Image: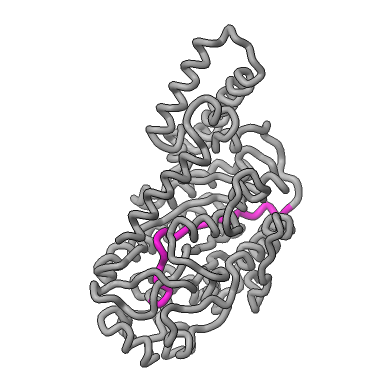
């Protein structure tokens, strides 16, 4: 559980460091300001497709998603947690490999050729820190330097480089429920209100900074009203009201959004993993299924791709809880009509299972880069090859049809 404490504490510290609280930070580093700072304009270039990024927080156990049920090493290392044939939906033509039966919608998409599984993805010299690993996936670099060219998430760099629209990238974690448009949480909202209240009291002092903040606040208000008005009539096909619902609502606004970011948490399963998965996996399955149905209803699914990823995988051997501890390599999943369905990357072997945790064979940036290039229609090189960063661009097979 130390990993969980580190995750929450450092994330909060990082949040405070990045956005700050008070007038100065709000005038410069407000994440909502980045969303609304420009006037609305048509996107330039690209395919006009929608990429949905679903971050599976906590470190999803790859071997509980796609299980090598016939492998004796897998079975021996997980006497309690190993899945058997009765607990998976076998892949077509396979008797040794299957998707967890608590994820039937994922299995159905795979059968239809609309789900691709990129196996054993990660990054060099992996570590077991939730915060550091999530930051690496978020920013596409290691050892993030504030003020460098990589001090914004990679999808924000993408927006600023190719389609600098205020609604080009929408993040359900910061924008909240569109029907209650506001700041990310009550603490930040209170600080913002206090800062703008002090600004109003000093309105006679017409400084350039004050004018900039007031104009930003006006744009936030205008854009919030626009987004709310475009989403207030949205009706979902199901009862789920999590981030998948918010993502579908945001997509329904049809405001030239090209990237939607959401998270689905709970995968830090150090103990009682079977019990945790018994609730977690069906919820993920059902909320994702609802999302796809919603996008079909608003006629967006045909040009949507959902990319699932997690900050790291988990150990091959179960612990005494029984659960699994932080590992290295994990799987990424691509879902959508334009996906080249099937298995990609390096299939898990006995040699891999004999390691403490799965190694990585595919750099996560190569998967993101493929989505940028082949789905969104932009060159990923300026996004990831910055500040001297390089990576192995080879995925091994084509991810999009």
Q: Nearer the viewer, residue 101 or 194?
A: 194
Q: Which residues are magenta?
A: 46-63
In-front residue for pair 387/117: 387
The quadrant holding residue 361 is bottom right
Quarter of the image that includes the N terminus = bottom left
Q: Quadrant of the C terminus?
A: bottom right
Residue 168 relative to residue 118: left or right: right
Q: Is residue 162 left or right of residue 259?
A: right
**How far across and down, in percent of the image, does residue 104 sit?**
38, 71
Q: Residue at x 46, y 26 (%)?
A: 192
Q: Is residue 355 magenta?
A: no
Q: Say above or below: 227 vs 304.
A: above
User: In this view of the protein, can residue 119 be seen by the observer?
Assistant: no
- How many labels sit on residues? 0
Nearer-the-camera pick, 291 or 164: 164
Q: Is residue 102 visible?
A: yes
What coloring was used for the rendering?
Answer: one colour
Looking at the picture, tell me which residue is in the foreground, 257 or 23.
23
In reply to whether residue 47 is colored magenta, the answer given is: yes
- Residue 70 vertical placement versus 343 (above, below): below
Q: Is residue 10 left or right of residue 46?
A: left
- Where is residue 319, by image quadrant? bottom left
Residue shown at 52%/28% (left/top)? 225
Please provide percent x and percent y for residue 22: 49, 27
In the image, what residue occupies the spot 40% across and 36% down? 185
Residue at 40% over, 72% down = 314
- Expressed as whole percent of the image width and height from the top left, the position of residue 346 reads 56, 82
Residue 131 in the image: x percent, y percent? 45, 56
């Amino acid at each position: 559980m130390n990993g969980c404490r580190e995750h929450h504490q450092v994330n909060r510290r990082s949040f405070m460091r990045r956005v700050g609280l008070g007038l100065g930070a709000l005038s410069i580093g407000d994440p909502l300001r980045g969303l609304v700072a420009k006037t609305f304009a048509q996107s330039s270039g690209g395919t006009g497709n929608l990429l949905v990024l679903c971050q599976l927080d906590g470190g999803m156990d790859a071997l509980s998603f796609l299980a090598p049920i016939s492998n004796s090493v897998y079975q021996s290392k997980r006497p309690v947690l190993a899945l058997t044939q009765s607990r998976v939906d076998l892949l077509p033509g396979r008797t040794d490999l299957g998707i967890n039966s608590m994820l039937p919608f994922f299995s159905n998409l795979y059968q239809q050729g609309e789900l691709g599984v990129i196996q054993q993805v990660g990054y060099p010299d992996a570590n077991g820190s939730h915060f550091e690993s999530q930051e690496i996936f978020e920013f596409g670099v290691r050892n993030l330097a504030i003020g460098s060219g990589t001090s914004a998430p990679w999808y924000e760099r993408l927006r600023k480089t190719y389609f600098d629209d205020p609604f080009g990238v929408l993040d359900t974690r910061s924008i909240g429920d569109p029907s209650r448009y506001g700041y990310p949480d009550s603490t930040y909202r209170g600080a913002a209100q206090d800062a703008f209240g002090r600004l109003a009291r000093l309105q006679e002092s017409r400084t350039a900074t004050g004018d900039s903040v007031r104009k930003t606040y006006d744009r936030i208000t205008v854009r919030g009203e626009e987004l709310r008005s475009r989403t207030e009539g949205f009706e979902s096909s199901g009862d789920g009201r999590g981030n998948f619902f918010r993502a579908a609502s945001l997509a329904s606004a049809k405001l030239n959004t090209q990237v939607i970011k959401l998270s689905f948490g709970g995968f830090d399963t150090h103990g009682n993993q079977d019990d945790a998965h018994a609730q977690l996996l069906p919820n993920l399955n059902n909320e994702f299924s609802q999302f796809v149905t919603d996008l079909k209803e608003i006629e967006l699914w045909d040009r949507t791709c959902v990319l699932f990823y997690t900050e790291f995988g988990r150990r091959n051997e179960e612990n005494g809880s029984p659960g699994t501890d932080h590992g290295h390599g994990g799987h990424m999943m691509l879902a959508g009509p334009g996906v080249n369905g099937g298995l990609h990357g390096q299939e898990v072997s006995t040699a891999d299972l004999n390691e403490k945790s799965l190694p990585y064979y595919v750099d996560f940036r190569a998967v993101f880069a493929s989505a940028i290039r082949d789905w969104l229609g932009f060159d990923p090189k300026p996004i990831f090859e910055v500040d001297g960063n390089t990576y192995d661009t080879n995925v091994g097979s084509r991810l999009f049809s």
